[in-house]
Amino acid sequence: MKSILETLEDSGDFSTFVQLVKEAGMENRLTNQGPYTVFVPTDSAFARVSEERMKEITADTDTITIILAYHVVPGTLTSETLRTVETVRSLLGTELVIRSSNKGITVNGVPIVEADAFCDNGICHAIDAALMPPALEVTIL
């Protein structure tokens, strides 16, 4: 089995997220630390973010780190576990709202499109949009 970062790199569907991880200097955390549950926006999810907004997001590493920390939760939460909880606390310290139905699971209203990619140091769930921490929504919008 591979680390979270190696799994994401090998997939090819998460190159934008991987690039942000490297820009923020979080490679070690997603390779050697954990366990973590990572909600990973797909490249197609990032492609829907405007170029101007991406420039704002990637302008400084502090902002990138805040956004990435909002996508990472301590522990290994499988989709089965996620169906039993209402909120989880991200590394940023803020809560993510989890909802499940017969249509699937959402994180802050964003659908999980591919669940349960098990890794050495946790688990990844692909999501259909990037999650924006509440504090950044105010400053970026």
Image (spheres, grey):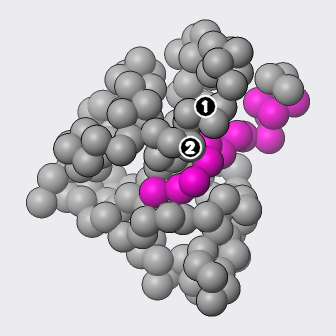
Residue at x 36%, y 44% (from the top left corner):
13
Q: Residue furthest bottom?
A: 102
Instruction: Return the residue at label 2.
Output: 45
Residue at x 60%, y 74% (from the top left corner):
105
Residue at x 56%, y 24% (from the top left corner):
64
Q: Residue furthest left?
A: 1
| Quarter of the figure with the C terminus | top right
The part of the chain drawn in magenta is: 126-138
Q: How many marks?
A: 2
Q: Are marks 2 and 1 in contact (CB under 8 Å)?
A: no
Check disc 1 and report its element: helix, strand or loop.
helix
Q: Is residue 128 above or below residue 26?
A: below
Determine the image quadrant of residue 78.
bottom left
| Quarter of the figure with the N terminus | bottom left
Residue at x 38%, y 25% (from the top left corner):
19
- Magenta stretch encompasses residue 3: no
Where's residue 10, x and y in %?
Answer: 20, 44
Q: Is residue 107 visible?
A: yes
Q: Is residue 74 visible?
A: no
Residue type (three-letter) at the residue carrying disc 2: Ala
Where's residue 92, x and y in %?
Answer: 61, 42
Residue type (three-letter) at the residue carrying disc 1: Ile
- Mark 2 vs mark 1, foreground winner is 2
Where's residue 62, x and y in %?
Answer: 58, 19
Q: Nearer the viewer, residue 18 or 50?
A: 50
Task: Name which of mark 2 and mark 1 comes first in the sequence.
Answer: 2
Check disc 2 and report its element: helix, strand or loop.
helix
Instruction: Return the residue at label 1.
Output: 66
